[in-house]
Amino acid sequence: MDNTEKQMDKKERAKERREKRRQEISLIRSIPYSDHQRWWSAETIAVVTGANRGIGFEIAHQLGLQGLTVVLTSRETAVGEESAKVLQEGGLKVVFHQLDVIDQQSIDTFCSWIKENYGGIDILINNAGFNYNIGSENSVEYAEKVITINYTGSKNMIKAAIPLMKPNHAGARIVTVSSRLGRLNGRKNRISDDALRQQLEDVDSLSEELIDGTLNKFLEQVKDGSWTTGGWPQNNTDYSLSKMAINAYTRVVARELAGRPEGEKIYVNCYCPGWVKTAMTGWAGQVTPEEGADTAVWLSLIPDMRISGKFFAERREIHF
């Protein structure tokens, strides 16, 4: 068997494993939560950002089906209201509020409204995201926008949500939609600077300053055109870095929140939904929005949550 055949064989086996896992999860999802597993109720508040379509809409849908109150948010009011209406007509407890995750005034208005109407939140799903490239394209024309929405927007929401998180014996949850493209040690798509990669891997010394500095360095190179020789990921460079950054920030926040007392715990994780058939992938993905939403919903509702600062895919922890 030559190398090409071996690689084909390896790909086939990986594909079979993925398919088997998808079937397993599909079966698990069909089993309802038992009463003693349900730590939530209709008073449990879940906020989903960028939820007017795609994965965000499906996350809101699935959480609504479990009987929670879901606050569906989007930047555009008209489309968000329309999406919430679709779920309301299905009998779900879904309300809409406008929210632009990169506009501090919008965030402040939203948080005041949440506090006034619900007293706080139990679950935050950071789903709002942006990617300019489709398929093998790799333009960095919108690099600043991609990083601002995917990284800064999610970071803004995490910082705004922490003071709003309600005390809860099961722990409040923050889940951010990320991507395997942002893995530090992916075989193909990674930062080639070993020293920088080791710094970003070291969870004890990892800091928001280091993450911000790394992204600023990339954006400076985008401006002067030197980014192509900067040792950055080769595939969807700006998107990959934005997701690497939010993965790293997830670990920083989990470390900072680790000392909270029982009853006031906040668990912070991120996950990769896979390549989902949505507008962002030009409808070319291999995973349905229902499957893409599943791990976010699972992390939001898992009864005995003790996991924080981790990265998941298909309901399993994967390496950063």
Image (cartoon, rainbow, N blue to C red):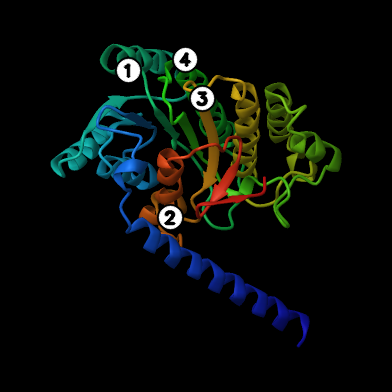
Query: Is residue 120 or residue 215 the one in the foreground?
Result: 120
Amino acid type assigned to the residue bearing label 3 in the image:
Lys
Q: Secondary structure at mark 1?
A: helix
Work out how far the residue at label 3 is from the one at label 4, CA to CA, in angstroms. Answer: 12 Å
Query: Is residue 137 or residue 290 the one in the foreground?
Result: 290
Question: Which numbered marker is on residue 163?
Answer: 4
Work out how far the residue at label 1 is from the one at label 3, CA to CA, in angstroms. Answer: 20 Å
- Depth-wise, is mark 3 or mark 4 nearer the camera? 3
Residue 206 location, x and y as percent?
Answer: 74, 28
At a point 40% along the width and 30% down the height, the residue shown is: 123
At a point 38% along the width and 62% down the height, the residue shown is: 26
Name the residue that disc number 3 marks. Answer: 265
- Depth-wise, is mark 4 or mark 1 nearer the camera? 4
Q: Is residue 292 left or right of residue 181?
A: left
Amino acid type assigned to the residue bearing label 1 in the image:
Ile
- Depth-wise, is mark 1 or mark 2 nearer the camera? 1
At a point 67% along the width and 49% down the height, the residue shown is: 319
Toward the front, the furthest residue is 36
Question: Which numbered marker is on residue 282?
Answer: 2
Q: Secondary structure at mark 2?
A: loop
Query: Is residue 99 or residue 175 the one in the foreground?
Result: 175
